[in-house]
Amino acid sequence: MLSGNIGPVCSRAGILFPEEGYVTPWFMLDIGITLFLIIYASDMLALFVSSVVHTTTAAMTIMPFILIFQLIFSGGVFSLPSWGEKLSNYTISKYGLACICAQADYNDLPMVTAWNTLKKMEDTKISEHVTAGMLIDALREDENLQELRDMEVEEGITVGELMDILDTAEDAQQIRSQKVGGDLTLGKIMEVIGEDRVKEYVQTQAAKASQKRAYDKTYGNIVESWIELILYALIFALFSMIMLKFIDKDKR
């Protein structure tokens, strides 16, 4: 079940959250714990920076670089090389993002970016170098298009059967070598296949390609991220105490 009583901002945006949590009985408590730990760990990081520098100007100069570091190495904005992924283990943002994505069941959500890009290209004309044979072979070889091959173009005749008929016809080679282009666009192809069918396929395949194990909605992923955030808060709090108690000569 979903609940719409999630605050005026989310309610106006039409965002619905699950009622049941994955760690606690309530989802809003789960997400509340996550946000609290992210904010608290970030506060301890800011406290540590304040304990190291002596002026507000110096703190304001350093903080943007720390924020950029947290953003880039969170792993959610850019694809990181192997050395970058190791470096991301030392950021608060990585575990905060992973926890939110796990709670939001990110890996099972449709990915709309690829579909939106394809939709913008619907007026793109097909290259004249594409032949009917190339399209037929693509439909036959791709296992993910089995549902499309089973679709009926006329009563009792499927797309797959039509392709077989074209291959066995007397002028099959002439049909296969015929160039596809001119006024044919991606949009028209999607209309023939079915725009809703193409949209579902593209979003599903894009989501599968974007899945990350750390974003799986599991008890272990969520609790592990909570523990990491708590450790970062404790570490930065400890460093701040050491700086202010034993090292800071101004005894701030």
Image: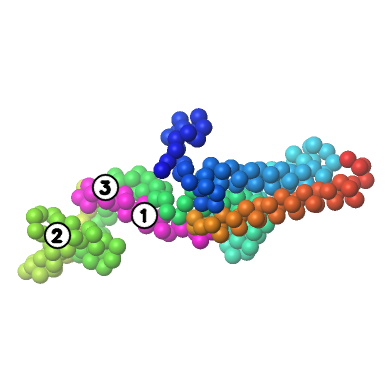
Regarding mark 2 in the picture, which secondary structure is present there? Answer: strand
Residue 153 appears left or right of 100: left
Query: Which-is-in-front pick, marks 1 and 3?
Result: 1
Magenta stretch containing residue 123, yes or no?
A: no
Q: Classify the position of the C terminus by image quarter.
A: top right
Task: Tell me which label, 2 or 1, sits earlier in the chain.
Answer: 2
Residue 162 appears left or right of 222: left
Kind of residue sitting beneath label 2: Thr
| Disc 2: which residue | 158
Residue that protrudes farthest toward the right in the picture: 249
Query: Which label number is shown at residue 195?
Result: 3
Residue 225 appears left or right of 200: right
Regarding mark 3 in the picture, which secondary structure is present there? Answer: helix
Give me the C-alpha separation between circle 3 and circle 2.
18 Å
Q: Which portion, as a residue range, is magenta? A: 190-214
Give me the C-alpha separation between circle 2 and circle 1.
24 Å
Kind of residue sitting beneath label 3: Glu
Task: Tell me which label, 1 or 3, sits earlier in the chain.
Answer: 3
| Disc 1: which residue | 204
In this figure, which colouring scheme has been used for the structure? Answer: rainbow
Q: Is residue 138 above or below residue 106?
A: below
Task: Tell me which label, 3 or 2, sits earlier in the chain.
Answer: 2
Q: Nearer the viewer, residue 106 or 58?
A: 106
Q: Residues within 10 Å of mark 2 (few under 14, many from 20)?
A: some
- Label 2 near label 3: C-beta < 8 Å? no
Kind of residue sitting beneath label 1: Thr
Regarding mark 1 in the picture, which secondary structure is present there? Answer: helix
Q: Which residue is found at the position 52% from the left and 44% from the top?
A: 26
